[in-house]
Image (cartoon, helix red, strand yellow):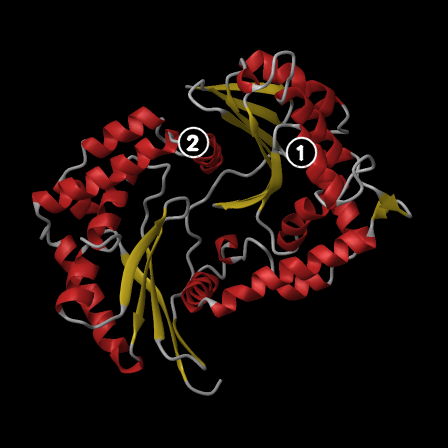
């Protein structure tokens, strides 16, 4: 059961009181509309904040302080949820029930969160240049490492092409050139602006009561100069003309990505059926794509599908020989056609439903998975409660899945093959 409290205008606390775990967690997220000019700034900010505070001016002193809090941790938290990007911090710590008599962990953890957020060491009124430049290098390295993972690179290229009229095509971490352009002054100005204007989402998992957690947070929140802006509601895919893109690179295996539009998001009643279709069609080793395109026909080295429920986008990704592009495309579309015609056995449906239900059950396996599921669900506008979601999955029929399959339309393809650029 999630208890939701509006602490101040634009600041929401969500509490999952759970006494099963020895560990608790607390996340603090500033929520922004995804924007090309902000993505890199938002991705860089939490890492810079975590480099030091006035009291703990370096990573070593931060580590020593966290060790005193029974080995607590604090890490950057940057997410993309549909039209939104979040930037903030995630804290993990021992639940107070397991501390020594007279000791507390949650309250000093909240105080340290305040310290990291609001008490950075400054020079000339802005962030330390050594902190900013060091973290810029780390972020650029992370972004560029994607190019070495050709499957991830190809998928990002597909989404950038397919969503060129939609912010969903933007990288969650920004682009290397955008990171390079950031200065201590521009980052500090952005930091002050988003602290003031962003909606704030705080999520706690642990044994403390919601009013107790709220009371601990108020000293931090009371120090913020706030004029929060209202976020626009999440939107479905912003339509544009489809395309068929081929890129050459020095690779030994081709990467084919196919992007489909579907007018069903996680805010629609057909969302569970669409997820079931994704499992039947291409997600997992019992799917039609895996069993037929890979196993029976040996047309690819790997293949799978995914579904971005916040946007209504389905994707297929396959590792193939360069000369198999047309054959694989044809067979992927043929397997989708079979779904559209109702060639789905009860066993396939039951297997898909059990896979979804198992995934939903696992959301309560740890504080981190609880926080990740429920905070993302709230931001994305998920139309179902957790129990309602599971009930809806159990009630999915073959007819529901067929209806979703017939709503899928191929929009864009991207093929990465070997050769000179």
- Residue 319 is left or right of residue 13, and the answer is left
**Label 2 residue SS:** loop
The numbered mark at residue 366 is 2
The numbered mark at residue 322 is none
Q: Residue at x 20, y 43 (%)?
A: 352
Question: Would you say residue 318 is visible in this rendering?
Answer: yes
Q: Looking at the image, is 148 positioned above or below residue 419?
A: above
Viewport quadrant of the N terminus? top left
Q: Looking at the image, is 52 positioned above or below residue 36?
A: above
**Label 1 residue SS:** helix
The answer to which of 200 and 227 lies nearer the viewer is 200
Q: Residue at x 75, y 28 (%)?
A: 224
x, y (%) of residue 413?
35, 68
- Residue 290 is left or right of residue 322, and the answer is left
Q: Residue furthest front?
A: 100
Question: Would you say residue 399 is visible in this rendering?
Answer: no
x, y (%) of residue 100?
60, 16
x, y (%) of residue 2?
45, 21
Q: Looking at the image, is 223 positioned above or below residue 310?
A: above
The residue at which mark 1 appears reads as 66
């Amino acid at each position: 059961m999630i208890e939701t409290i509006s602490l101040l205008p634009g600041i929401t606390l969500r509490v999952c009181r759970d006494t099963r775990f020895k560990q608790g967690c607390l996340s603090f997220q500033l929520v922004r509309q995804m924007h090309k000019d902000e993505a890199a700034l938002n991705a860089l900010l939490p890492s810079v904040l975590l480099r030091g505070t006035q009291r703990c001016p370096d990573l070593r002193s931060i580590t020593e302080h966290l060790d005193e809090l029974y080995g607590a941790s604090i890490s950057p938290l940057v997410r993309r949820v549909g039209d939104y990007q979040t930037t903030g911090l995630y804290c993990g710590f021992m639940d107070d029930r397991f501390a020594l008599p007279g000791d507390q962990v949650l309250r000093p953890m909240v105080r340290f969160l305040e310290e990291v957020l609001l008490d950075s060491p400054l020079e000339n009124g802005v962030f330390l240049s050594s902190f900013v430049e060091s973290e810029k290098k780390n972020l650029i390295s992370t972004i560029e490492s994607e190019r070495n993972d050709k499957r991830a690179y190809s998928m990002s290229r597909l989404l950038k092409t397919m969503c060129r009229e939609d912010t969903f095509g933007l990288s969650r971490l920004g682009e290397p050139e955008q990171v390079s352009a950031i200065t201590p002054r521009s980052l500090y100005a952005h930091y002050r602006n988003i602290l003031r204007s962003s909606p704030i989402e705080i999520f706690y998992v642990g044994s403390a009561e919601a009013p107790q957690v709220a009371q601990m947070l108020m000293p931090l929140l009371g120090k913020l100069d706030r004029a929060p802006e209202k976020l626009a509601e999440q939107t479905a895919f912003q339509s544009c003309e489809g395309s068929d893109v081929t890129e050459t690179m020095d690779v030994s295996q081709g990467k084919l990505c196919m992007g489909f539009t579907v007018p069903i998001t996680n805010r629609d009643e057909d969302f569970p059926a669409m997820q079931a279709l994704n499992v039947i069609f291409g997600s997992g080793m019992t799917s039609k794509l895996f069993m037929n395109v890979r196993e029976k026909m040996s047309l690819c080295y790997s293949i799978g599908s995914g579904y971005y429920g916040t946007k209504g986008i389905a994707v297929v990704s396959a590792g193939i020989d360069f000369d198999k592009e047309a054959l694989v495309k044809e067979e992927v579309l043929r397997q989708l056609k079979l779904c559209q015609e109702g060639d789905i056995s009860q066993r396939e449906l039951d297997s898909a439903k059990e896979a979804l239900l198992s995934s939903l059950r696992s959301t309560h396996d740890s504080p981190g998975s609880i926080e990740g599921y429920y905070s993302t669900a709230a931001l994305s506008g998920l139309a179902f409660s957790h129990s309602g979601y599971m009930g809806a999955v159990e009630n999915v029929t073959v007819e529901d899945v067929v209806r979703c399959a017939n709503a899928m339309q191929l929009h864009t393809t991207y093929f990465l093959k070997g050769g000179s650029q």
